[in-house]
Image (cartoon, grey):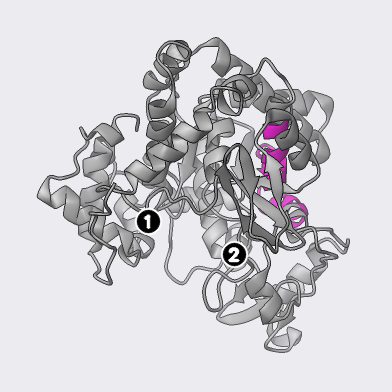
Amino acid sequence: MADNHEEPGKSRVSSGQIRQALTHLFPELGTFWPRPLSDYAHAVYDRVDRGNCSVRNDAMGRLQTLVSNVALRSGASEDQALDAARQISELPVMQSGPHCFLMVDPEAFYTHLFSALGLSSHRRRWHMYFGCSTVKFIERPGKGPGWFDDSGHLVNVFGLSRRRMGSTSLCGHNGPYEFKLDADIPSAVSPTAQWLKTHLPETVFPTASDAIVAANQTLWKQFFPLSLQLLQFNDTDIGELVADHFEDPDSWLSRRFAGDNLVAEKILCAIDDLNGGLWAAWVRRTTDFFWGLAGGRIVPLRLDNGVLTGSITSGISIPFTPQNLALSLRQHRLIPNLLMMALVTSILPGVRLLGGSRQTVYHPLMRYLVATALDVEHDRALLAAIRNDRRAGMWGHRVLRPANAFPLLETEKTGHGLAVAAAYGEQSLETSAGDLSFFTADPIWPVMCGHITSGKITAASTEWQWA
């Protein structure tokens, strides 16, 4: 299909235009802008209406097993792990906004604070959080998981060279990694970095992602009461979940996704069609379902004639069969991409994902792509279940963005994170969200706002019917 969409330009939109666009796509948001943030935080963790079928029940059971295993690995007791698995079934909501950042980074801290506000209002014990680790240490100058902003002074979290931070991903098994916290000012002038040095693990880790997960487990206990526990997933955990599906010949992923019917190929065709129209660039074919992992770098792959292949230099060539995919995932040669992550943690089990400025749009579109590729005859029950979902994805990352706020300073004043959350909870949603700069500065959002203003994209658009 010809590429007839408007290319994202350098134009910007106002925060008011973004609020109008979000309200147009998610009409319920219109009632929340003037209300306290606590009302919206309660709503994102409120009742989740989801369809049921045997495929969905199977996927939820596998996700519960993963939740239990991750809880045990993080130090929970058997009873606590069972409680966590029970919660994901009773309240199927997962935070998937911030990348794999140290919790003291403002981008992560205030999102976790928002989730804590919602969870505590429902008296729930577990904060389920997926932190994407297929990202590089530097996302933009002076920002990313490899940096920590200490009141305007940059701290190099792992003491890595800028070249290494710009070329490798957090999920890469190319350690060792340890917290060095190299600051551009003496530690005596940097009390935050000094505090971190006394609280972060001194262990050496095989991946930076493992190091951050361990550190956040420790930091969470400093900021929040025992009544609220943190449960973190990274891409390796999701890879284990996907492998669990593929190792069972009776699972939907084995029978329908990568089996003889190859729903996967239909999804790729649907992505190509989507990128030829008004919704272009929201779901890109950066890689086909999986990343190849070579050392510390992720490699884009293409599915062609039943084989996942990387570049010639990568040497990656994996038959697209359940057995080969499962083995490669277990060996950490493959890492699921965001579409696969959404499939096994949200679309199949029926879990609400809370995401950021782009996920608010690309997650509903991923649901549309999967539904479009399903077969009415073979997947009738699953299609009906997905169609019956309500609010399968909601805006939940960078909802709280206070200006010039520093997590450690705030918690020192109030004692713990829930007190900080309660104070922000009294602000209106519009005030707490600030200038919405992650929307307004993103070149894809002016295009979206233009399509909404012109009436080309509406809440009734075919591609939006699965939101």
**Marks 1, 2: nearer the viewer:** 2
- Measured from the top left, where is residue 261 in percent x and y? 54, 22
Most extreme residue toward the right, as rendered? 203
Q: Which residues are magenta?
A: 214-243
The residue closer to the viewer here, 381 or 320, is 320
Q: Is residue 131 left or right of residue 183?
A: left
Tell me residue 60's x, y (percent): 61, 22
Q: Are marks 1 and 2 in contact (CB under 8 Å)?
A: no
**Label 2 neighbour load within 10 Å: few <14, some 14-19, many 20+:** some
Q: What residue sits right under mark 2 in the picture?
A: 105
Q: Is residue 115 magenta?
A: no
Q: Quadrant of residue 47?
A: top left
Marks 1/2: CA–CA distance: 18 Å
Vertical relation: 255 (above or below) 204 = above
Q: Is residue 327 above or below residue 147?
A: above
> In terms of secondary structure, where does tag 1 sit?
helix
Q: Is residue 310 above or below residue 394?
A: below
> In the rendered image, which quarter contains the C terminus?
top left
Q: Amino acid at mark 1?
A: Ser
Location of residue 133 (image quadrant): bottom right
Q: Determine which residue is flagged by label 1.
A: 432
Residue shown at 43% from the left, 12% from the top: 380
Asked if residue 212 lies left or right of residue 103, the reply is right
Nearest to the observer: residue 363 or residue 373: 373
Asked whether the viewer can see residue 317, the reply is yes
Mainly helix, strand or loop, the magenta region? Answer: helix
How packed mark 1 is, by other alpha carbons closer than 10 Å (few <14, some 14-19, many 20 or more), is: many
Image quarter of residue 56: top right
